[in-house]
Amino acid sequence: MKWLDALRSIQRRDPAAKSLLEVVLFYPGVHALFFYAIAHRLYKVRLFLVARLFPHIGRLVSGIEIHPGARIGQRLFIDHGFGVVIGETSVIGDDVLMYHGVTLGSKTLGNFKRHPTIEDRVILGAGAKILGDIVIGHDSIVGANAVVSKSIPPYSVVGGIPAVSLKRDVN
């Protein structure tokens, strides 16, 4: 993870962020991603038990739970963040914006890909639940409190329970 690039990206995207120091000190998403980065490296070298310790501490500090097996791209911004859960086989692309209460969860148990893939530049509204081995296409928006259990194509806007297409813009 390129930390300075990620911090500047957060400051650019959040009008409330007045300085990089403020982002480092007071943004729980940054804290959770710091613990995740350590845990993910340990997880990749199969130190599973030790790897689980770091996101546990991160959750206590930030209220955000990220499994060390998840794969996260560059410049993820978890805004506010409390209650976010990112499951073990989740894949998150670059420049994703995720609000508080988002769940990237599973619908089944097993040793296979069971969590969603979030492509680049997706916005996940507060409280959104994205469940199962599905793909949220790049440049899409998932509305607040939407429950998504089917893949959605790029440039989509979805909302509701279950989520339905509200608009599709194929720029």
Image (spheres, rainbow, N blue to C red):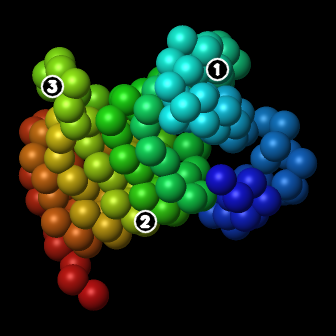
Residue at 26% across, 43% down: 116
Between residue 154 and residue 68, name the one nearer to us: 68
Q: What is the C-alpha distance between the residues marked 1 and 2?
A: 27 Å
User: Can residue 112 be seen in this snapshot?
Assistant: yes
For badge 1, the amino acid type reads Phe
C-beta proximity under 8 Å, tags 2 and 3: no
For badge 3, the amino acid type reads Lys
Residue at 55% across, 52% down: 76
Determine which residue is flagged by label 2.
121
For badge 2, the amino acid type reads Arg
Q: What is the C-alpha distance between the residues marked 3 and 1?
A: 25 Å
Q: Is residue 30 left or right of residue 101?
A: right
Instruction: Determine whether the residue tagged by mark 3 lies in a helix, strand or loop.
Output: loop
In the depicted structure, whether residue 136 falls above or below residue 106: below
Residue at 49% across, 48% down: 72
Q: Residue 104: which disc?
A: none
Q: Position of residue 120 (x, y in %)?
A: 40, 65
Q: What is the C-alpha distance between the residues marked 2 and 3?
A: 25 Å
User: Can residue 147 be seen in this snapshot?
Assistant: no
Determine which residue is flagged by label 3.
107
2 or 3: mark nearer the eye: 3
In the depicted structure, whether residue 53 falls above or below residue 77: above
In the depicted structure, whether residue 75 falls above or below residue 60: below
1 or 2: mark nearer the eye: 1
In the depicted structure, whether residue 56 falls above or below residue 142: above
Q: Position of residue 138 (x, y in %)?
A: 31, 67
> Which tag, 1 or 2, sits closer to the chain's start?
1
Q: Residue 54: which disc?
A: 1
